Image: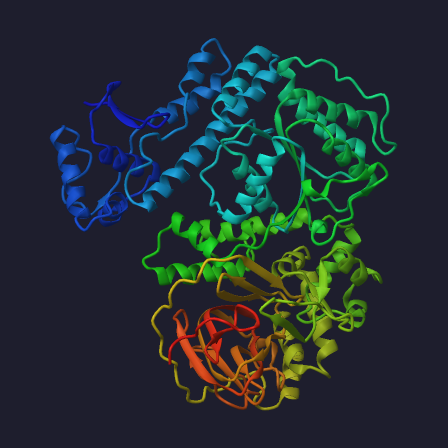
Amino acid sequence: MLVLTLSLLGHTYLSSDNRPLRLSQKAVALITFLVREGRPQHRERLANLLWNTPGALRNLRVELSRLNQRGLELFPVNQPMLELTIPTDFDDWISGAATQPDTRLNDWLSSVSTLPLNGLDDLGTPEFQEWVHAQRAALSQQIERTLSQVYDRALQLGQHGAAHAVRTHIRQLGLRIVPATPAPTTTAVQFERRPLRARLQQILSRAEQQPQLVLLSGSSRPGRHDLIERCTEQTSWHVLELEAAAQPDVQHAALLHQVLRIMLPDGLSEPHLPATRPAELSEEMIRVWTLIAQSRQQLLIAIHDVARLSPSLLSSLHFAMNLRCSLTLVLTGAALRGPVPLDTSEGAFDLSRVHQLELPPLSVQEIAEAADLRAPPASADLSLQRAARIAQESEGWDLHAQALIEQPPVPSQRVPDVVRSALVGSLDVPPPLRRALSQLAMVHGTLGPAVAELIVQPPYPEALLEGERRGLLVTAAPEEIMHMPAAGYRPSDQDSRLTLISEAARVTLAGLLTSSERRHLRTVLAEHLLPTDPALALYYARGANLPDLTRLALERLGPAGGAVPGTPPYTVLPATDPPSAAVAGPRTERRTGNAYRVALDGQQLEIMRRGQHARPPLLRLRWEHVPAGTWRLVARVDVFQAAPELGVLAGEECFALGVRTPRTLETYLPVGAPFSSQERRPALRLPMHRWFQLSGQSEGGPLELQVRALDIALIIRHWSCGGSLLDRGPPWTGTGLSA
């Protein structure tokens, strides 16, 4: 019986009893794909991956026949699904790491002399080549982590010679040492973020000559880590990551520990300290930076979640920026968005070497690419539908989007467990404030002093002010205006109402209370709202299972209270053909206090919201001085929720899309959306998950798109008026759709 082994380390080939078999490159590519994927694959998919020709299936049958002729009967005849399990040299190499370092260390290291999957780069379709690149990255990452584990083990055992050999081998492979390496895991979903990666890689190139400082803002900690990791993989840059610390000595000790873990095998001498030092800079910190300069390594040092740039941190950075070495300093945190003061007593920073980058929420396109790679959809339309839903529900947060891609959503679970854990871990607030925010999270509406006084126990008078200062509460106006096409938005100081930063945060905070505490708060709110807002009181009463309060709320609402209104006749707008792909261009995204996200991605306009479970506010996107003529819009709706269970107030009916001209306002609902009892006019119904086209007349002047929805995923591919596209800014240019 043949004993087959697939070699992945270096050049890819199949061997029998340790003898390489002479197979075609396409056969090796087919076998490699099946072994690495580890699950059955359709013949049609395999053929379309490996051959970009009309006769792809025929070519696949020829390759399978050739394998049978060689005596490799790997697949049953006429079976539509193919799968294959063969041991690999990579598996043997990983299992051998458990005994390292030992006397066979050099033999074990020599098994990995080049990067994996060589010989497959120029085969198949572009989709297959992308798969090869993704697999190579995954294998390289696991190789990197395994070598780092052996390196750590050698240091712990005091075998500095072995540690030096492993570290040298890592550098020769163009990999890096990962401090505190976790156990290898299955390949995680990764998001490309190509423009941002290209920008950071340019900064790394400049940092080879002079130190560079990067201020990286953005709320996604996993996204920031992934960006740094992917920009430095297969380079000579070593990455040291640490958390910002309130005490400078703690920061310095953590950095020194990581530096010594990498540098000690070289036997560096005690660093020579300069005769003078800045007043804010400790002797220990100078020792760390001097050691880094002497190491002659390319180092990227990332300090995460910087709340503020303290004088000691600024002095430390200023000193490091004047070293003569290859160094990139990356500070991350929400506080680094917008103008950042970089003043020190030692002098000004060289601003030509200071770079502000922002990690934006993931776009629909970025999510679609990652999700399609994980589970290819049946059509481009289904790909867009899935990506829009994930972008809306995750709010573009890497960790949340990754969880939704990797695991099917649970209908009863508003927030995945991994996201809840991350949010709880990031809530660096005093216990009294955390409890106050958890109680406020039970309110399905805006927050103010009166409601805080009603439900926060024990009293915490500064809860709203402190929550807003820490960025956990934001302004929530009943109506928000964004000026287009620049996406200009600024909340007014006159809007005193607040809301929690996101629905995921609200659900997570409320989950920190016990079931009895939540029921008590619903009871308090139901009793409080019964005289003034019986519809919302009814929602709280039903949530707390309070029959008496439920009956009283229904009596106040009248005979129709709590009933589902009938749906009047309506017309469904016919679906239109998919428009051409959006022209590539820079992406700009703005988020309002009510969690509406408006993004201009090339010439595509995206409007997303995962709202707080409250009555939805109005969003107005306003274009000024638009020419007169016919307006045309091509769009699609993939998510729409209106929360009728909270009660609908007159004049606040929800809709997925509204178009306002100086004289008219037309609103539209998707098919399946309920009409509220307050609604005074039926709306033309829009198809869900399909492109549609709308048009109308405008006499010129201001033109608005409006949305009022709890949850919405609206993508607009074309928006014009008077034959001019409205996504390019005045003076309006371009050509609209032909009549």
- Asked whether residue 368 appears in the rendered view, the answer is yes
Relative to 713, 64 lies left or right? left
Q: Which image quarter holds the C terminus?
A: bottom left
Snapshot quadrant of residue 294? top right
- Give the left or right position of residue 433, taking residue 93 as reference: right
Q: Give the residue at x 75% y 28%.
A: 253
Q: Position of residue 688 (x, y in %)?
A: 41, 72
Residue 652 to residue 140: above or below: below
Using the image as rendered, state which of residue 104 and residue 140 is in the foreground. Answer: 140
- Residue that protrudes farthest toward the left in the picture: 69
Could you tell me residue 124's position as x and y percent? Answer: 28, 42
Q: In the figure, residue 561 lies in which quadrant?
A: bottom right
Question: Residue 688 or 27: which is nearer the viewer?
Answer: 27
Foreground residue among 673 and 548: 673
Q: How is the image coloured?
A: rainbow
Q: Nearer the viewer, residue 279 or 252?
A: 279
Residue placed at 34% from the left, 40% from the top?
37
Residue lying furthest top: 103
Q: Is residue 413 visible?
A: no
Q: Residue furthest right?
A: 279
Screen quadrant of the N terminus: top left
Is residue 459 toward the left or the right of residue 57 in the image?
A: right
Residue 557 image offset from top left, x and y in percent: 63, 87
Give the answer, above or below, for where 683 lies relative to 638: below
Quadrant position of residue 647: bottom right
